[in-house]
Structure formats: C-alpha cells, structure tokens
C-alpha cells in the first residue's frame, strides 16, 4: 500500500546545523494496517510524516502509494490520497465557519472547483448521520461556528473531515496529545471506529506507550532517522511496556529519551 524505500532527508546541508533526520529509512504498510509510531525526541517521526505528505521532497529514496511513485509529487497533489490530523485542535478546522461549512469543504475536496450551489438537504443528511456516530451531539449543531466547540469536539470534527472522502492513507501526528486524558481516550475510540469502518490504512505517532501497544496492529520504533523495531502479531499481543523499553534499549543502544513519553 505505502512503500517507503531508503529515504534520506538532511536539514541544513553543509552547515554547522546539518542534521540527517531520515537516514535511508524504509517502511512498508499493507492495506488496513494501523501502525503506531514511537521513538525518542528528534528520532524523525514527524519528519517521516512530512516526507510522506510531501511537505518537502526527500534527498534520495522512493515513496509509493499503491505502486504509484509519489516521490516527486507536490503536497497538494498528494492531498486526495493522504489525510493528516495534527496535534493542535485549532489547526484542522476553520474557526469562523460553521460545522456544516467545514464539512462541505472536506466533502467536496478534490472535486471540481466550479462555483457550487449551497449545501443541499442530501449533504446535510450525510453530515448529520456521520456526526451522530461521534456521539457528541454535534449533529444538532450544524450551523454553529466551530469556534464554539471544545478542543476535543474540534479534534473529532477534524478526524471526521480527514476521513469524509476516504483517503488511501491517514496520518495522525500525536492528534490527541493536546487533549485532556478523558477527551483523548474518546477521540482515540472515534479514531478506531472510523479506521475500522472505513478500512483505512493509518500511521499514528504517539508518545503514550500504552496506546502504542493497544491501538492498531503494528508498532514501529524509530531512532536516529531509522525504523529500528517493527513489532506485530503474537509478539505484540504479549508485549508489556517494560518489554518495549528493553527492546528499544537493546536495538538502539540508548535509553528512550523523551520528555513527553507517557509510560502508562
Ligand atoms: N525544518 C527543519 N529544519 C531543521 N531541522 C529540522 C527540521 N525539522 C526537523 N528537524 C530536525 O530533524 C530531527 C527530527 O525531527 P522530528 O521533528 O522529525 O523528530 P520527532 O521524532 O518527531 O521528535 P519529537 O518526538 O520531539 O516531536 C530533529 O533533530 C529536528 O531538530
């Protein structure tokens, strides 16, 4: 599905600040994979998602989705295939617009840019049905401005918008890290529901080791711009957080060093 082959990304090449952020990293995702991504500070997790989304071109290596080479495709041309949800609940929605105005933008994404008629009754029905599934009562607030919503409600709406036109790949960049624990759990539950219902292939960065093992079907660990562990199947099912930390230390020769890691 997603095939990342030996991608290299160096920032500030030839300067004192030169940094190899992705060091010939390879990763393959299969259809319906839900892969959690963990690693130390600066391991290259966000840079990997940026490279896949096309925020920059990699220096070398290859990225393909469903066998189509997207390595040199600009971000806006990857946007029909790849959806992304960021940490900041304010970043995925337009605050001054209503819930239905936000949804219609996502719904019509990638479709012709000709002047469009207003939102129709059929579209409203679709939005209401989708919002109802979130269980947050937003289906009765279609004409409310998004600025009135809480962080968790906004993040749930962002998730819905990101998956309204089924993407080939969903990238979640610590999308619950800015929420309080209870709301984070709710948004994670919604994430599981939507990825299962829509059969999405998903890559989720998290600093929560418990979430890294309990969500999805695979966990990859990154260190210094590479994937150093790929854990799945029975091995993953039986794994505890201390096993995970031990494996990391063995594979990397370093301690898992992150100020934001949540161990339980
Ligand atoms: N635009 C940039 N310019 C220069 N250096 C960058 C840039 N983006 C990332 N880096 C560097 O590349 C390395 C990888 O950064 P990245 O943000 O991908 O790490 P991360 O694993 O997501 O870390 P964290 O868990 O702390 O968010 C870091 O050393 C970072 O400082």
Image (spheres, helix red, strand yellow):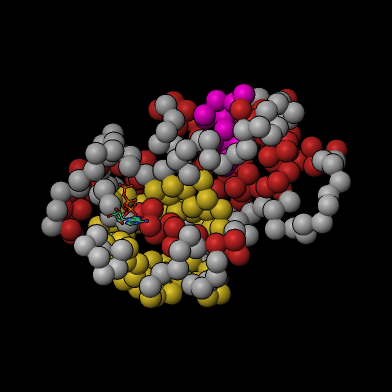
Residue at x 32% of width, y 63% of height: 11
User: Magenta residues, as a range?
Assistant: 148-159
Q: In the image, is residue 58 above or below residue 222?
A: below
65 lies above or below 219: below
Pick the front one: 21 or 120:
21
Instruction: Name which residue lies at 24% across and 39% down.
Output: 259
Residue 48 on image: x %, y %: 39, 59
Image side of residue 6 versus residue 103, left or right: left
- Image spot of residue 135 (x, y percent): 62, 28
Q: Quadrant of the C terminus?
A: top left
Task: Name the spot of residue 156 as percent of width and height, x first.
Answer: 56, 35
Q: Quadrant of residue 3?
A: bottom left
> Per the image, is 150 magenta?
yes
The residue shown at (73%, 43%) is 104
Kindly tell me whether residue 209 is visible in this rendering: yes
Q: Position of residue 161 (x, y in %)?
A: 63, 44
Residue shown at 17% from the left, 58% from the top: 252
Q: Is residue 104 left or right of residue 60?
A: right
Asked if the stretch drawn in magenta spans residue 34, the answer is no
Q: In the picture shown, does residue 193 fall above or below 80?
A: above
State the predominant SS element of the stretch in magenta.
helix
186 or 214, nearer to the observer: 186
């Amino acid at each position: 599905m997603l095939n990342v082959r030996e991608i290299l990304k160096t920032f500030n090449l030839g300067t004192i600040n030169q940094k190899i952020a992705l060091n010939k990293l390879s990763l393959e995702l299969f259809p319906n994979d839900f892969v959690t991504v963990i690693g130390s500070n600066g391991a290259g997790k966000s840079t990997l998602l940026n490279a896949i989304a096309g925020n920059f071109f990699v220096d070398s290596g290859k990225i393909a989705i469903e066998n189509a080479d997207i390595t040199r495709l600009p971000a806006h041309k990857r946007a029909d295939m790849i959806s992304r949800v960021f940490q900041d609940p304010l970043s995925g929605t337009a605050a001054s617009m209503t819930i239905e105005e936000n949804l219609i933008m996502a719904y019509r994404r990638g479709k012709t840019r000709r002047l469009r008629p207003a939102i129709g009754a059929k579209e409203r029905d679709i939005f209401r049905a989708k919002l109802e599934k979130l269980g947050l009562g937003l289906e009765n607030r279609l004409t409310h401005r998004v600025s009135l919503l809480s962080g968790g409600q906004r993040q749930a709406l962002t998730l819905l918008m990101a998956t309204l036109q089924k993407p080939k790949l969903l990238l979640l960049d610590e999308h619950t890290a800015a929420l309080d624990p209870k709301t984070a759990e709710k948004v994670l539950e919604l994430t599981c529901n939507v990825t299962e219902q829509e059969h999405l292939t998903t890559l989720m960065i998290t600093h929560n080791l418990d979430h890294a093992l309990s969500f999805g079907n695979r966990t990859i660990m990154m260190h210094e711009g590479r994937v150093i562990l790929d854990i799945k199947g029975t091995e993953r099912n039986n794994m505890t957080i201390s096993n995970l930390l031990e494996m990391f230390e063995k594979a990397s020769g370093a301690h898992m060093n992150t100020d934001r890691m949540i161990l339980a």
